[in-house]
Amino acid sequence: MTNPAPVPAFLRGNLEQTSTLASAWIRGLESTEEQIMKWTTGLSPEGLWWSATPDSNTIGGLINHIWITNLRLLHFAQGVALPAELNKTAPEQLAPTGEGLEDILRKFVAAQTRLKAALRQMSPEDLETPRERLGQWVPALHLCHKLVEHSHEHVGQIITLRKLWNAQKA
């Protein structure tokens, strides 16, 4: 008998003692984490930093970019200053570091934990508070929503890169 497929994150419903909106965002982050874990399983160090073309991203760079940018978005949503570790441009975040997969995933999971905890704690008033980003004022909830969208955009790239890596190694 085969094991049934796990229930997708978006079908798991609300989390206890968490608003519907925060639950939806957290489920989206869970989906991101599950997909990254799935598509990096068994990935070699060479595959982690492989680039399909000279100007394309790497899986390792994309994972770093996801967690750094999402924590940046959270800080903007909370209206707090960025710590030095998050004060990096996108090209700096995406640049190959040579780190091992285990180290990258550890940082990613730690960021995910911080994000989920912060989303649970944000009140409706916090979410409606206008925050400035790139010269525009938007309610903080738009920044929170973007961090989930941002994650999903790059997960698609990670999946494609892994498939390309597997195909060229076959």
Image (cartoon, grey):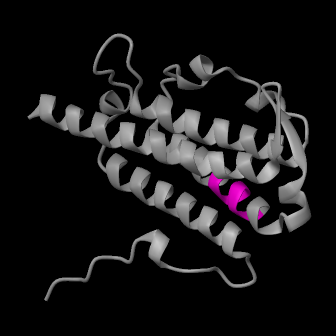
Q: Is residue 115 left or right of residue 159?
A: right
Residue 123 position (above or below residue 157): below
Q: Is residue 79 visible?
A: yes
* Extreme residue toward the top, this view: 54
Depth check, front residue: 41 or 36 = 36
Residues drawn in magenta: 112-117
Q: Which quadrant of the view contains residue 82?
A: top right
Q: What quarter of the picture does the C terminus occupy?
A: top left
Specify the principal SS of the magenta part. Answer: helix
Give the residue drawn at x 47%, y 70%. Answer: 9
Give the residue drawn at x 64%, y 71%. Answer: 23
* Extreme residue toward the left, this view: 170
Depth check, front residue: 71 or 98 = 71
* Residue 93 pos. (x, y %): 60, 25
Residue 86 position (above or below residue 13): above
Q: Is residue 44 left or right of residue 64?
A: left
* Residue 45 pos. (x, y %): 36, 32
Q: What quarter of the picture does the N terminus occupy?
A: bottom left
Give the residue drawn at x 49%, y 29%. Answer: 61
* Residue 101 pos. (x, y %): 45, 40
Give the residue drawn at x 61%, y 18%. Answer: 92
Q: Is residue 123 visible?
A: no
On whether residue 27 falls in the magenta region, the answer is no
Circle count: 0
Residue 15 position (above or below residue 67): below
